[in-house]
Image (cartoon, grey):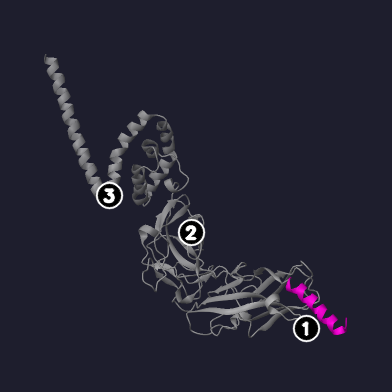
Amino acid sequence: MNISKLIIFFNIILFSILSNSAVSLKGVSGASFFNLETRKIYGGTTGACPGGGDAATTCNTCTEPQTGSSVLKPCNQKNIHGALRIVLSFQSSTDLTKFPVILSVGNTDGSSLAEVDRLTVGPAKDVAASLSTTWSAICSLDTKLDSSCAFKTSDDHSVFTGKSFFIDVDESNNGIIDPNTERTPIAVILHAINPANTTYDNQPYCATGPANYGLCFYSLEIGDQKLVILGDPAPLYNATPPDSSPEFQAVAFFAFPWATGISATGISNGAVQPVIKQFESATNLSIQDEPYITGLENYVRYCVFAGQMNITQNIFGFTTTSLDANQMCKITSEVVGVLDGKKCFISTAAFGSDMASEVQIFRNFRDTFLLTNRYGIDFVKAYYQYGPIGARFISDSETLKIFARTALYPLVGFSWIALNYGIMPALLVMLLMMVMLFHIRKKISHFLKFNQTKQGRL
């Protein structure tokens, strides 16, 4: 075999080995979100990091207000910045110690590549390795942003796509170059919201129309140191994000104690941290997590603002106007009843089920009238303390249940009237009933006395 044939044979063998041992991406750090399955890196930013920013980690722009702002502004709990390092971890199933491994950034089609990192000696077989660069390498390619990922224009936001990282094995020294088999592309999606503008700050609650992406259909129920989120049907009027921004991933709830009214004034970034509830998917907008806002104090009236969070983790579009107090404001209490861990109620024991319509009337009366004032709260606390004793006393006796139901039905009626017509009509009906009962009792008493007198004469 002559030398030229031997070289060709050697190159064919080497090409075969490397073609079957492409670099395998294992993970990415330094991003707002990373999807290994689709090999996509997402970066979200809503402005400068508090205190500057650490090269090793994302920052939380939800922790303190933006300069000069006393209202909720778009924020990101995993905010990227120019100095943040993106680290791409990989390994190969073959020995690459003779081949440099290169990280480049450029157009997704592989054109206009610029090298940003290189391993002069690649990893051995099955050995982990990594390449890295900073977000400035991406942000500086966006005409709206500078190398620190800050806006240099007056635009409201920027959606930057069409760029990718590429991990290549440099085989040029051996005359073998095949990016189709040895190249590993990782797409980059960047979404930046300009903190100086207000376009993406807020939106009306339950907004309608094709231009809106408003939160709608959510309401709250009372829980023990929590609020229970009800969301049926789907929570968003329009699931399509605005202006081609990345798809929505979750709703961020901001619960704050109600003081003088439902107002966004003074409720700013840092005052309340968001509770994130993930959607099932980009098309299934039901909440996949437990529907609770936890860590709250009992017997405090809370109102809830909410913002949409897209896959870059940017939170924006807060429901701070046209908020429905009946839906988005509740007072927490010890018992949720039908929605959570239940204690025994006398009414539940009497009517046989916490799903009974009479029990639901009492529950609604509690939420509407008792938990809205100090005296009612005191009554509820006492009832939760001593009610289970009475419930246990009557639960095993059908006779006692009958007596309990008979005693409770007038209260059911009073509560129903109060809920449907107001507390004053209910009090008036109760007063009339008491007057009628008094007169009936008086007539019965006179009748009995008359009979006793008549019998005495006989």
Residue where numbered disc 3 is placed:
423
Please tell me which residue is depicted at 30% across the width and 34% down the height of the picture: 406
Across and down, in percent, residue 51 comes to 60, 73
Residue 287, numbered circle:
2
Whether residues under marks 1 and 3 lie with C-beta atoms below 8 angstroms apart, the answer is no
Q: CA distance from mark 1 to mark 3?
A: 89 Å
Q: What quarter of the picture does the N terminus occupy?
A: bottom right
Above or below — where is 259 with respect to 364?
below
Across and down, in percent, residue 123 comes to 77, 71
Tag 2, which secondary structure?
loop
Left/right of residue 251 with respect to residue 6 in the rendered view: left
Residue where numbered disc 1 is placed:
175
Residue 308, numbered circle:
none
Q: Residue furthest front?
A: 1
Across and down, in percent, residue 235 comes to 42, 62
Q: Nearer the viewer, residue 120 or 207?
A: 120
**Disc 3 residue type?**
Ile
Whether residues under marks 2 and 1 lie with C-beta atoms below 8 angstroms apart, the answer is no
The nearer-to-camera label among 2 and 1 is 1
Tag 1, which secondary structure?
loop
Across and down, in percent, residue 195 comes to 50, 77
Please tell me which residue is depicted at 88% across the width and 83% down the height of the picture: 2
Q: Quadrant of residue 411?
A: top left
**Disc 1 residue type?**
Gly
Tag 3, which secondary structure?
helix
Left/right of residue 373 with respect to residue 172 in the rendered view: left
Q: Tell me which segment is drawn in magenta.
A: 1-20
